[in-house]
């Protein structure tokens, strides 16, 4: 067994590898950029080596620094995680040449599967079904147009060296082909330095199904069944599950056998994933599933496979890298229950899913679910790396049970002030079509109107905010208006500010118990995976905070996008003073009471730090 392991990665996957390696008695070494020095994965490893500044090309992608770190710490092996250098054949070769153990796919297999056209040609030769298309050397526009016409529209143009949805275009008619080709090539050249493309038939009701395979150095290859990764947004996976809904035993046997055949064709060793595209127009059928590509590494979604098989795939990686045979034979592996994983990202669904960065003043996860996270409360989401906050995994006896458990857990997540897609994920997991297994890769786009929150607080949130704030302020002629109702106590109609906008509502009877917490002097209400800054409109500075002398403070770092008052101006309680853009969101800061703008320090376009005094309002004496 290996004695020491350097993890050439960061965040969630680095923590994941450290956890298993330490369980196996292996000394762990983390590498980190300067901005990651206080991250949990650094603290949890036995040793840590700083390898450069925040930009990945100067740290996590710098092969020389990583190899130097391995040498300095006496590491025996390097685990690349996923992303960064995990599928870089040159790096794998350098690790091996340095006398270290590479916990990954053989460099030859990485190269064989690295180019989509060559991989498909290899799979065709091995007898693995591939999507109808053109993989030829002739890259002239005329030849590509001719091949697309012969395949029949719609077709998909894909960059040969592509990934992550870059260099990919759907074309529905011959007249649109050449423009789409030119655009695809420009994007591919910019992203990968290679503008070559392949053409394949576009599947109209596609399901993205992948099979987990594992090989060892003794010639054994097994599969650990399939996963369905069809819920995607802009070609990026959002929710993954295992097994695939609607998969019968005959089709499962066929697709898993094809995956094993594909792995054997490249003498595969370690963890890998064979990805297939399925035409689900008439359900899943073995003759309508085709090879798409191979990922020569551990996948982000590997926890769902671990859940249904009871296996630790990182442990399998480390044992195989140590020269051991696979821990299980094919006939010893079986599916137990159903697992669904949701990727919790720091992003704002109501703002076009733009990344949301900043401090994590609040970060609370539900109990009873598996949570794989790279950050913790008190840390931050930075702009330098992937904005994943966590992977949330539910495992139950049935698919419906797992979906219900996942949706309930996602609704309990509390994150502030960073915005997340928790509410969006909860809606997807609870959607009736998702629960029924009516899914394909266009599911999210097709149902966006019911999956993506619109940014307006639902009535229950306004009610909860009102009920929370009413006891704090007592009766007030400005905020409570009573009306006569026979034999009933008067109910107040009150106004509250939620994320800077004022709402007036008749308080329900009896009010619900809301989940609220005080953060940085403000009150945050959590509901169904979303956080809302709430305040009494008569004493609030919008989503900011107000000092005792009437100073309006910046609630977090950001940029002033507008100033709506001038120094000396008279303002009324709740009036908008200025707008701060922070974490890709605009937040209105409001006057806390009637008064005069005694001082105005904010200027349009100015950058401010948290706690900066932006304005000061003085009360007017009567």
Image (tube, rainbow, N blue to C red):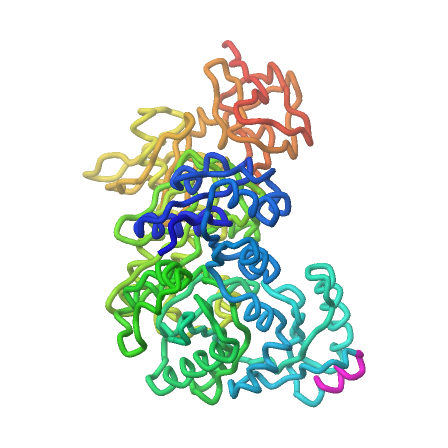
Residue 144 falls within the magenta-colored stretch: yes
Residue 504 falls within the magenta-colored stretch: no
Above or below — where is 102 with respect to 122? above
Q: Position of residue 567 (x, y in %)?
A: 65, 18
Please indicate, yes or no, whether residue 447 appears anywhere in the rendered image.
yes
Q: Residue at x 64, y 25 (%)?
A: 565
Magenta stretch: dominant secondary structure: helix
Name the foreground residue: 437 vs 26: 26
Indicate left or right for 328 with 294 as reference. left
Which quadrant does the N terminus fall into? bottom left
Indicate left or right for 175 with 567 as reference. right
Indicate left or right for 548 with 170 as reference. left
Above or below — where is 599 with respect to 220? above
Please indicate, yes or no, whether residue 498 appears anywhere in the rendered image.
no
Indicate left or right for 498 with 141 as reference. left
Q: Position of residue 331 (x, y in %)?
A: 28, 79
Q: Position of residue 414 (x, y in %)?
A: 37, 43
The residue range painted magenta reads: 140-148
Above or below — where is 493 with respect to 9? above
Name the foreground residue: 190 vs 326: 326
Above or below — where is 468 with respect to 280? above
Name the foreground residue: 10 vs 236: 10
Q: Report the label total.
A: 0
Q: Residue at x 26, y 75 (%)?
A: 332
């Amino acid at each position: 067994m290996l004695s020491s392991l350097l993890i050439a990665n960061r965040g969630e996957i680095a923590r994941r590898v450290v956890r298993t390696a330490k369980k196996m008695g292996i000394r762990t070494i983390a590498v980190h950029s300067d901005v990651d020095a206080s991250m949990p994965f650094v603290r949890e490893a036995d040793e840590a080596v700083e390898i450069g500044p925040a930009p990945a090309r100067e740290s996590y992608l710098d092969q020389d620094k990583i190899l130097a770190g391995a040498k300095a710490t006496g590491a025996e092996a390097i685990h690349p995680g996923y992303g960064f250098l995990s599928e870089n054949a040159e790096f794998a070769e350098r690790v091996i040449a340095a006398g270290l153990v590479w916990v990954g796919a053989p460099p030859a297999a990485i190269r064989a599967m690295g180019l989509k056209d060559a991989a498909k040609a290899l799979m065709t030769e091995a007898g693995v079904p591939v999507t109808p298309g053109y993989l030829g050397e002739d890259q002239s526009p005329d030849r590509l147009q001719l091949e697309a016409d012969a395949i029949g529209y719609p077709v998909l143009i894909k960059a040969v060296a592509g990934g992550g949805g870059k260099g990919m275009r759907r074309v529905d008619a011959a007249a649109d082909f050449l423009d789409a080709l030119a655009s695809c090539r420009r994007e591919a050249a910019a992203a990968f330095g290679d503008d070559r493309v392949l053409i394949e038939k576009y599947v109209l009701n596609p399901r993205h199904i992948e099979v987990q395979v594992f090989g060892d150095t003794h010639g054994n290859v097994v599969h650990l069944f399939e996963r369905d990764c069809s819920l995607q947004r802009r070609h990026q996976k959002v929710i993954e599950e295992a097994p695939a809904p609607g998969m019968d035993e005959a089709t499962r046997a066929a697709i898993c056998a094809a995956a094993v055949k594909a792995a054997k064709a490249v003498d595969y060793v370690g963890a890998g994933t064979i990805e297939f595209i399925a035409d689900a127009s008439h359900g899943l059928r073995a003759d309508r599933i085709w090879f798409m590509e191979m990922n020569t590494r551990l996948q982000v979604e590997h926890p769902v496979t671990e859940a249904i098989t009871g296996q630790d795939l990182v442990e399998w990686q480390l044992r195989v890298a140590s020269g051991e045979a696979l821990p299980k034979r094919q006939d010893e592996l079986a599916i137990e229950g159903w697992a669904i994983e949701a990727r919790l990202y720091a992003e704002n669904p109501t703002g076009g899913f733009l990344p949301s960065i900043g401090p994590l003043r609040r970060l609370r996860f539900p109990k009873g679910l598996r949570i794989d996270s790279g950050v913790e409360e008190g840390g931050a989401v930075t702009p330098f790396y992937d904005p994943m906050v966590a992977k949330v995994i539910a495992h139950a006896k049935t698919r419906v049970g797992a979906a219900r458990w996942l949706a309930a857990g996602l609704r309990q997540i509390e994150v502030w002030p960073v915005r997340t897609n928790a509410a969006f994920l909860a809606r997807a997991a609870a959607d009736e079509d998702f629960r029924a297994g009516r899914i394909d890769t266009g599911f999210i786009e097709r149902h966006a109107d019911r999956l993506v929150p619109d940014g307006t607080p639902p009535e229950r949130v306004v009610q909860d905010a009102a009920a929370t704030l009413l006891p704090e302020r007592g009766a007030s002629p400005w905020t409570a208006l009573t009306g006569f109702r026979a034999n009933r106590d008067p109910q107040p109609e009150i106004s509250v500010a939620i994320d800077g906008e004022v709402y007036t509502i008749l308080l329900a009877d009896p009010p619900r118990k809301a989940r609220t917490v005080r953060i940085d002097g403000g009150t945050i209400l959590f509901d169904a995976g979303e956080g809302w800054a709430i305040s009494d409109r008569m004493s609030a500075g919008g989503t900011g905070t107000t000092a005792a002398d009437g100073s309006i403070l910046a609630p977090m770092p950001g940029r002033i996008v507008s100033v709506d008052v001038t120094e000396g101006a008279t303002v009324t309680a709740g009036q908008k003073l200025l707008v701060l853009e922070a974490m890709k969101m605009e937040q209105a800061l409001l006057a806390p009471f009637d008064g005069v703008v005694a001082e105005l320090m904010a200027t349009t376009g100015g950058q401010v730090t948290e706690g900066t005094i932006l304005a000061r309002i003085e009360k007017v004496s009567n």
